Image (cartoon, rainbow, N blue to C red):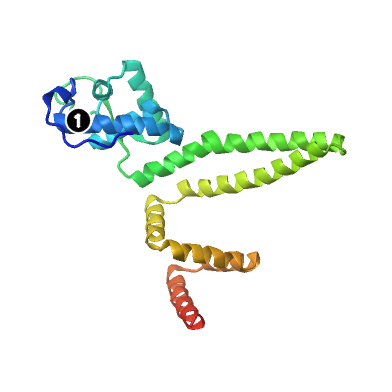
C-alpha cells in the first residue's frame, strides 16, 4: 500500500467533483486515504465500500449528503446508499439533518457524519464483529462438540474420534475465553478504554513481560482472590491500597 502523498499541486490530479467546502489538494489526499482504508477494511471484516465511506466522512469532519459522498467517491446511487446504511449499522457513521438545507420547503433532508470519537466507533466495531463472527463460531464449535461426543460414545474404540473430541473441547475453551475478552471491550466506556490502553502504552514492555512471568508463578486462587478483592474497593480505598502495596513491594524487593 502506498503512503499518503504530499499535498498535490498539479491541477491534473484534482478530482473532477469536489464537494462543497473541500480544497482540491486536500480532497486528493482524502480519496487516497479512503482507497487505502477500503483495502484494509477486509482485514477487519468490513466491506471495502463501507470502509471507504467511513474514511472519507472521518476526514471531512462534517455532515455530508448521500449525493456528496456518492460524487466524491465515484459510487452509484445504490452503492452509496447501501454503503452508508451498512456503515450506520456498524456504528461507524450516524444520520443527522442536512446542515445546508436553507430556504427549502418540505421535510429536512438526511446527511451522514462519521462518529467523531474513534474509541466509540472502535468499541462498536468490536461488538459488531463479535455478533457477526465470534458468536456464530462458538455455535458451530458447540454443535461439532456434541456431534463428535455422540460419535465417540458410539465408537469407543475409534481413537481418531476420541482425539478429535478432545481437540474440539480444548479449542472450544480457547475460543470462549477469547470471545469473552473481546466482548469486554464494547462494555467499557470510551474514556475507560482509552485510559486503560494509554496507561498500558506507558508501561515498558520489559515490565509487562516480568509481570506476566510473575503471575505465571503464582497459584490461580491467589491471583483470583486478589483481583476479586480489588474490584470491590472504592476508588479512595483502592488508591490507599495501591500506595501501600507499592511501598511494601519496594521494601520486600530490596
Furthest-front residue in this view: 2
Q: Quadrant of residue 235?
A: bottom left
Quarter of the image holding residue 82? top left
Q: Is residue 51 visible?
A: no
- Let me know if residue 220 appears in the view: yes
At which x and y percent is residue 240? 44, 76
Residue sitting at 50 percent across and 66 percent down? 210
Q: Position of residue 222 (x, y in %)?
A: 62, 69
Circle 1 residues within 10 Å: few <14, some 14–19, many ≥20: many
Q: List x then y, in percent, for residue 172.
A: 66, 43
Side (left or right) of 181 relative to 116? right
Image quarter (top left, top right, bottom left or bottom right) of the N terminus: top left
Left or right relative to 46: residue 31: left
In the image, 192: left or right of 31?
right
Residue 189 in picture, x, y percent from top left: 41, 51
Residue toward you, 149 or 130 = 149
The structure residue drawn at horizontal position 25% and vertical position 22%, both measured from the top left corner, is 107
Vertical comparison of 122 with 210: above or below? above
Residue at (19%, 23%) from the top-left corner? 15
The secondary structure type at the circle numbered 1 is helix
- Foreground of the two, 248 or 124: 248
Q: Quadrant of residue 24?
A: top left
Residue behind mark 1: 27
The answer to whether residue 68 is left or right of residue 227 is left
Amino acid at each position: 500500500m502506498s503512503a499518503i502523498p504530499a499535498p498535490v499541486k498539479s491541477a491534473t490530479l484534482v478530482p473532477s467533483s469536489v464537494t462543497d467546502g473541500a480544497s482540491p489538494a486536500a480532497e486528493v489526499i482524502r480519496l487516497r486515504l479512503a482507497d487505502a482504508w477500503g483495502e484494509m477494511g477486509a482485514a477487519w471484516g468490513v466491506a471495502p465500500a463501507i470502509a471507504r465511506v467511513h474514511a472519507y466522512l472521518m476526514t471531512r469532519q462534517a455532515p455530508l449528503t448521500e449525493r456528496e459522498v456518492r460524487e466524491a467517491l465515484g459510487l452509484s446511487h445504490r452503492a452509496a446508499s447501501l454503503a452508508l446504511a451498512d456503515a450506520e449499522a456498524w456504528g461507524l457513521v450516524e444520520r443527522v439533518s442536512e446542515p445546508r438545507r436553507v430556504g427549502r420547503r418540505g421535510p429536512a433532508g438526511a446527511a451522514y457524519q462519521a462518529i467523531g470519537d474513534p474509541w466509540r466507533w472502535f468499541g462498536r466495531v468490536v461488538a459488531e464483529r463479535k455478533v457477526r463472527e465470534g458468536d456464530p463460531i462458538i455455535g458451530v464449535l458447540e454443535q461439532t462438540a456434541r456431534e463428535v461426543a455422540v460419535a465417540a460414545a458410539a465408537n469407543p474404540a475409534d481413537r481418531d474420534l476420541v482425539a478429535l473430541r478432545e481437540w474440539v473441547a480444548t479449542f472450544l475453551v480457547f475460543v470462549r475465553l477469547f470471545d469473552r475478552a473481546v466482548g469486554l471491550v464494547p462494555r467499557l466506556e470510551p474514556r475507560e478504554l482509552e485510559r486503560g490502553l494509554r496507561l498500558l502504552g506507558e508501561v515498558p514492555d520489559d515490565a509487562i513481560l516480568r509481570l506476566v512471568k510473575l503471575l505465571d508463578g503464582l497459584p490461580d486462587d491467589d491471583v483470583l482472590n486478589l483481583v476479586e478483592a480489588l474490584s470491590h474497593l472504592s476508588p479512595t480505598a483502592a488508591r490507599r491500597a495501591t500506595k501501600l502495596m507499592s511501598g511494601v513491594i519496594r521494601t520486600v524487593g530490596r
